[in-house]
Image: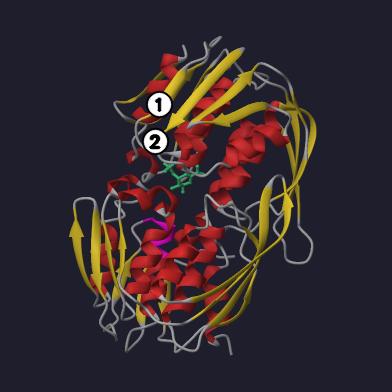
Amino acid sequence: MPALSEAVIRPAARVRGSVRVPGDKSISHRYALLAALAHGRSTIRNYSTGADCASTLACLRALGVQIDTAAGRDGRGPTVRIVGRGLRGLHRPAAALDAGNSGTTMRLLSGVLAAHGFTAVITGDESLRRRPMRRVIEPLTLMGARVDGDGDRPPLTITGADLRPIDYAVPVPSAQVKSAVLLAGLQTPGETTVREAASTRDHTELAVRVFGGRLTAAGGGITVSGGAPLAAAELEVPGDVSSSTFWAVTAAALPGSDVELTDLGLNPTRTALFDVLERAGAIVERAIESEAGAEPRGRIRVRHGSLRPLTIGEEDVPALIDELPALAAMATHGGEIHVTGAAELRVKESDRISALAAGLRALGAEITELPDGFHVRGRRPLTGGTAHAAHDHRLAMAFAVAALGASGPSLITGADAVAVSYPGFFETLAALTGADG
Ligand code: S3P
């Protein structure tokens, strides 16, 4: 599909229909990395179509991993076959590894490379090169790797080693940091433990076990017994609940809406959004239908009910971190949201507090920026206007959701950023709003 750098969004009364979103981004990264460290050939079906997960595959190929991709069946994402090289079996890359826009690629791959006896450089695009990396540099250095950044920032130069296991309390709740340490620990004889004050998504833990790794979770600590070989696996990635968020909040926002999201990953560490929508007054039906790779999956139906004010505090943030821009967009449709304890948003693909505020304001919304959050007071309709996605996929999608409630058309610039996680976003938007003819 050609890059879409500008998208025109026309007001819409409601959204209706059934959607299968692309495969989960977080899970796709993890399956690919673990498959590369396993013995034998793994098959991953419905791999994410997002550019971020393609970056992980490109990095793995540059590290000597044989990877084949084939189109998926029935509109599903591609099937990826990966021939694993075993623990610490990757090859020294000929050039710097490019993680593109993907923080997950950079941070998780750092953990993988920390245990390999060569030097590699991981870099990324302009947005990624602004993101903090001290959080992975610190634990991987404690384990014995040498990791140098440009100060706190990428590119990272990693010289791996025979690591020592550590017991590490992650200072900021982060699934990426937790995963980097677990992936390093998996390749290190002995027991590596990661402790987190607030639970974050547990896809790495579930996936390590699926590949035959030894991992236990108890009392806030997650311990991996490293050094034992992993076995190839047959896997299917469920739909990305964070991509489905945009349709769920739109259905909750617009009266008369009724959206069904099918084949969705329903891991409880990812579904806090639906509880929040219920708190706001939306009608949410959920059905877990199966489990694959220990990841529950099923369907969710969201209908508009009311749009009561929401307050989100620090304790809610780790489980909702990727959903906050979408919730802000929902609030512009006559709701209200007050978010605090979310300073992490400032170091995502963009400064997701100031760029969110700038974009929503450009569409006519009333939003106050806070040091660690924001406050939106929704007064319908918005005027509409031009919002800049700031190289951030989730902002491009959030602005589109807000723009549906404007009195005239809006323009989103940098709209091609959606390809990072959801290449078909605008086509699905047109189908759900009935704007596709
Ligand atoms: C992710 C973890 C989260 C999230 C990101 C994906 C992951 O980041 O925001 O989109 O796949 O582990 P942090 O771990 O930095 O909070």
Chain-order first, disc 2 or disc 1:
1
Would you say the residues marked 2 and 1 are in contact, meaning their CB atoms lie under 8 Å apart? yes
Q: Is residue 37 above or below residue 21?
A: above
Q: Residue at x 40, y 65 (%)?
A: 326
| Position of residue 13 measured from the top left corner of the image (x, y, whole percent) | 44, 89
Quarter of the image where one finds residue 226: top right
The answer to which of 11 and 229 lies nearer the viewer is: 229
Q: Measure the alpha-carbon separation of dots 2 and 1.
A: 8 Å
| Position of residue 97 measured from the top left corner of the image (x, y, whole percent) | 52, 32
Q: The disc labelled 2 sits on which kind of residue?
A: Ala
- Could you tell whether 315 is left or right of 273 in the image? left
Q: Is residue 398 visible?
A: yes
- Could you tell whether 199 is left or right of 343 in the image? right
Which of the labelled discs sits on residue 31, or is there none?
none
Mark 1: give few (<14), some (14-19) or many (20+) Cα within 10 Å.
some
Which of the labelled discs sits on residue 197, or is there none?
2
Instruction: Name the residue furthest front.
Output: 219
Mark 2: give few (<14), some (14-19) or many (20+) Cα within 10 Å.
few
Q: Residue at x 52, y 76 (%)?
A: 429
Quarter of the image where one finds residue 50: bottom right
| Position of residue 160 measured from the top left corner of the image (x, y, whole percent) | 52, 15
Q: The disc labelled 1 sits on which kind of residue?
A: Ala
Q: Main secondary structure of the magenta part?
A: helix
Quarter of the image where one finds residue 241: bottom right
Quadrant of the image for the C terminus?
A: bottom right
Q: In this view, does 230 lie above or below 299?
A: above
Q: Residue at x 43, y 74 (%)?
A: 7
| Position of residue 193 measured from the top left corner of the image (x, y, whole percent) | 51, 22
Please give the residue where the numbered disc 1 appears in the rendered image. 169
Q: Find the magenta span and give its range.
A: 391-396
